[in-house]
Amino acid sequence: MKIYALFLISGLAVGSLYALGGIGLVVLRRATGFLNFAYGAIAAASAMICWQFIDWGFAGPVSWLMSILTGVALSVFFGRFFASGLAWREPVVKAVATLGFALIILGLISFIWDDAARKLVLPTDKIGFRLMEVRITVTRVIAFGASLLIALGMILYLEKTKTGLLMRALANNRAHSALIGIPILRVETIAWALSGALAGFTGMMFGDLVRLDPTIITFMVIPAIAAAICGRLESLFLTFIGGLSIGVAEAMLTLVKTAAPFRSLVPFVVAVLVILWMQRKQRLVFQTED
């Protein structure tokens, strides 16, 4: 029983990071139309910056802040200098552009840091409590709590604030939004900054809870996209549930000897099942209309 509880808690912690990634992707896509494949690379760069500042001897809060600011800076840089010029292009073109940006970031990371093994340790790793005979670190609690609070906070932000209203209007029709005087660049910059801040935080937590490896963190975008698909690239609550489900499924499959080698396929399987389910619902609607 203890081993199952251990993997469940671990899965919830990692799933929370997938959920955070998915939330960052959904918020950005709802406001700008971009599905940001560079999200994982931005998170990886942020985690490495956090490690570097800690290695230089800076205080923890300064290093954590630099991680988040790095995510914001990289995200806003792409949003202002590249995304605005691609605003009228097809979604596939936009996605490929973010993929190219991800490769550039990975190249810069490889140029600045060698392949030596590194470990990112947060002070909250040493603080914890026991539940079901399993020690739970405060870091894992922060990961889960942050994903839940951010999901709720972003839902309220998009629904209740003026900027959230402008983001939703922009997502519905960019041309009409420009005609009625919505400051498109300012609203889009806020969306890119929010997504970048989430990427910076997610990368830092992922580097601590899983592994500080730029390539592994970069590919975190795959389960994050799968979580976003669970929310139909629109619902933040369903994205949160999808991220948790993917993390728990990956963790629990580790305990099944025959299935453990295939646990990395979980995000793909979940995404395909959700897409098939959505298509089924669409077919039912069409049949009803006929």
Image: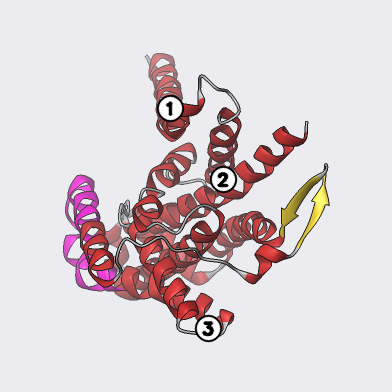
- Residue 81 on the magenta segment: yes
The answer for how far apart the CA atoms under marks 2 and 3 are is 26 Å
Badge 1: how crowded within 10 Å, few (<14), some, or many (20+)? some
Residue 64 in the image, given as x and y percentages of width and height: 52, 75
Sequence order check: which comes first, mark 1 or mark 3?
3
Q: Which amino acid does label 3 sit on?
A: Val
What residue sits right under mark 2 in the picture? 15
Q: Do the residues labelled 2 and 3 touch (CB within 8 Å)?
A: no
259 w.r.t. 71: above or below:
above
Q: Is 246 in front, or is 274?
A: 246
Asked whether, in this view, residue 242 is left or right of residue 93, the answer is right
What residue sits right under mark 1 in the picture? 269
Residue occupying the point 22% across, 60% down: 101
What's the magenta region? 77-101
Residue occupying the point 24% across, 50% down: 95
Q: What residue type is labelled 2?
A: Gly
Is residue 190 in sight in this rendering?
A: no
Q: Are marks 1 and 3 in contact (CB under 8 Å)?
A: no
